[in-house]
Image: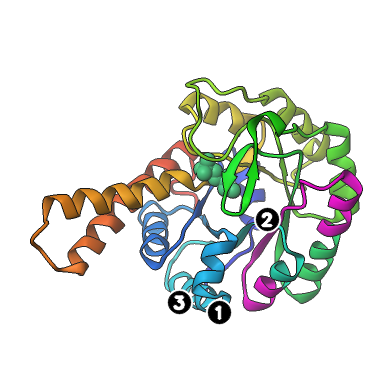
């Protein structure tokens, strides 16, 4: 059995100078490809679902796939619910067997964000070995049902970050630092590395207690990834890149084999393209060989 929550593998990562890839999937093929990549590279891994794909397949189906794939994989695997704004759905996923839950109440004022996040953290901790992620400030761009205009994105205040973590009881923390969901509009997006480092020092200066999450992985330049890891990023979320890989690989295969009606071959091609993309991330994050 290699089912884990996110906090335990992130603490190990933060202590040892690497980071865990957290990959948003929408279907079985992507799920398999992420686990295959983790097994091939001996990497710990987080598979994540946004709310819509989780609702589309159903929580029980998602967890059944997770348990089936994770049980036979000789690497630690976590199933994470990403950016859920609905407390009831967070609880439903915790009950079903997700091992990390993100309550995203970041659009609310500080006190309401704390209230909602604490409710989910208390619940998850009472039902099982489930870690909880909270967010402060807002990440620009679009992820599933969460949309934030770039000019409305707010960075996390370091002092408030400490208060937020202490009062909510979250296990892992996503401070907004300027990274964004989707494709970056410029080659050098404005990311506040120092803010992440300051928050990391304030929370984890005496030893890793609350590992930090970096959202908006797609399109981050390689040198940014290095700096973000050094500043304390222990989980990097990647969603848009895998969506593009899925659609582009399907398009490429169908275009090249327009007369062929063999879904199995198409699936193998798409799964392989996804596996390669995920391995690329595991190499950049330094998680290869760490499982
Ligand atoms: P990207 O879509 O930019 O990779 O961001 C993913 C993410 O942060 C999911 O929470």
Image: magenta residue range: 92-117
- Return the residue at label 3: 68
Give the residue at mark 2: 7
User: Label 3: few (<14), some or many (≥20) within 10 Å?
Assistant: few
Residue 171, image quadrant: bottom right
Is the C-beta separation of discs 1 and 2 under 8 Å? no
Q: Quadrant of residue 33?
A: bottom left
Q: Is residue 236 visible?
A: no
Q: Is residue 127 above or below residue 23?
A: below
Q: Which mark's residue is nearer the viewer, 1 or 2? A: 1
Is residue 160 shown left or right of residue 258?
Answer: right
Local crowd size for mark 2, using a 10 Å CA cut-off: few (<14), some (14–19), many (≥20):
many
* Residue 112 within the segment the image draws in magenta: yes
Q: Do the numbered discs 3 and 2 sit on residues whose CB atoms are within 8 Å?
A: no
Badge number at residue 60: 1
Where does residue 92 sit, x and y in percent of width and height?
Answer: 69, 74
**Residue at x 18% of width, y 64% of height:** 265
**What's the residue at 21%, 68% (across, down)?**
263
- Image x and y of residue 159, in percent: 88, 34
**Quarter occupied by residue 226:** top right
Residue 220 at what x, y percent from top left? 50, 31
Q: CA distance from mark 1 to mark 3?
A: 12 Å
Q: Say which element carries label 3.
A: helix
Q: Residues within 10 Å of mark 1 (few under 14, many from 20)?
A: some
């Amino acid at each position: 059995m290699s089912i884990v929550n996110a906090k335990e593998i992130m603490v190990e990562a933060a202590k040892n100078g690497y980071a865990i890839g957290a990959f948003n999937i929408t279907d079985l093929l992507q799920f398999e490809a992420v686990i295959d990549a983790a097994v091939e590279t001996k990497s710990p891994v987080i598979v994540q679902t946004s709310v819509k794909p989780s609702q589309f397949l159903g929580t029980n189906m998602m967890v059944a796939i997770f348990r089936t794939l994770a049980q036979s994989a000789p690497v630690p695997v976590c199933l994470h619910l990403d950016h859920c704004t609905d407390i009831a759905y967070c609880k439903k996923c915790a009950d079903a067997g997700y091992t990390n839950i993100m309550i995203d109440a970041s659009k609310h004022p500080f006190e309401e964000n704390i209230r909602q996040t604490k409710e989910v953290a208390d619940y998850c901790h009472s039902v099982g070995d489930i870690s909880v992620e909270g967010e402060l400030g807002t990440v620009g761009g679009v992820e599933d049902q969460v949309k934030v205009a770039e000019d409305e994105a707010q960075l996390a205040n370091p002092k408030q970050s400490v208060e937020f973590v202490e009062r909510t009881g979250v296990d892992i923390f996503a401070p907004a630092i300027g990274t964004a969901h989707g494709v970056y509009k410029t080659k050098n997006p404005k990311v506040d590395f120092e803010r992440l480092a300051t928050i990391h020092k304030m929370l984890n200066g005496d030893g890793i207690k609350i590992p930090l999450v970096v959202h908006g992985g797609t399109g981050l330049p390689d040198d940014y990834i290095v700096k973000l890891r050094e500043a304390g990023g222990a989980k990097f979320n990647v969603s848009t890149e895998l969506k593009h890989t899925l659609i582009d690989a399907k398009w490429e295969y169908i275009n090249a084999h327009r007369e062929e009606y063999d879904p199995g071959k198409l699936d193998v091609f798409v799964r392989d393209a996804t596996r390669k993309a995920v391995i690329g991330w595991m190499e950049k994050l330094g998680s290869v060989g760490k499982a």
